[in-house]
Amino acid sequence: MEENTRYNVVFSGLIYVTFVVKISFLVSALYLRYLKKTDPKNIELQTFVQNVKEQLDFAFVFFMSVILMALFNPYVENVEVDKECQILLFLYGVIMILTANYDIFLDHSVVLHDLSNNSLFNPNNVQTYNYH
């Protein structure tokens, strides 16, 4: 496979994953709003959905930053913007990754919590989550 074609496949995949993440974010935001109206006493589920929504938002910002960096990095020659704009948008992507709130994702990640407890594939292990 030619290198340019491989890049296009990876880039297209990144675009699709970013869309899925953003749609999942919207679904979780709507579901959280629904929960708050229909089941306001279920704070544990609301907290969990809020956590998932925040993680999806983090993932979206991260993926969008990677996309911006891929499109507008100074080494790409075929972008149709002037050099100043190209560098500005590339730096925006870098800054967004560097200033993202990693603590929310790392401290509350459902996947990382499951992996750290080796309980991802153990259905007998009942988990509790401590949300701040």
Image: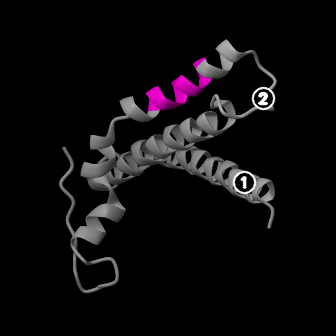
Write the residue at 20% across / 65% down. 128
Q: Position of residue 55 (x, y in %)?
A: 41, 47
| Left or right: 68, with 128 as reference point | right
- How many numbered circles are shown? 2
Q: In the drawing, does residue 84 fall left or right of residue 128?
A: right
**Residue 116's image quarter?**
bottom left
Q: Amino acid at mark 1?
A: Tyr
- Is 43 displayed left or right of 39 in the figure? left
In magenta, the rendered stretch is 88-96
Q: Which residue is mark 1?
A: 7
Identify the secondary structure beneath mark 2. loop
Q: Is residue 127 above or below residue 27?
A: below
Q: Position of residue 72 (x, y in %)?
A: 66, 30
Mark carried by residue 55: none
Task: Residue at 31%, 84% (x, y): give it.
Answer: 123
Say which quarter of the image contains residue 127. bottom left
Q: Quadrant of the C terminus?
A: top left
Query: In the rendered image, which residue does mark 2 sit on?
Result: 79
Is 93 included in the stretch rendered in magenta? Answer: yes
Q: CA distance from mark 1 to mark 2?
A: 15 Å
Nearest the viewer among 71 and 47 is 71
Point out the image quarter for the N terminus.
bottom right
Dominant secondary structure, magenta: helix
Q: Earlier in the sequence, mark 1 or mark 2?
A: 1
Q: Residue at x 66, y 33 (%)?
A: 75
- 126 falls in the magenta region: no
**37 displayed left or right of 67:** left
Front residue of 5 and 119: 5
Residue closest to the eye, 40 or 96: 96
The amino acid beneath tag 2 is Val
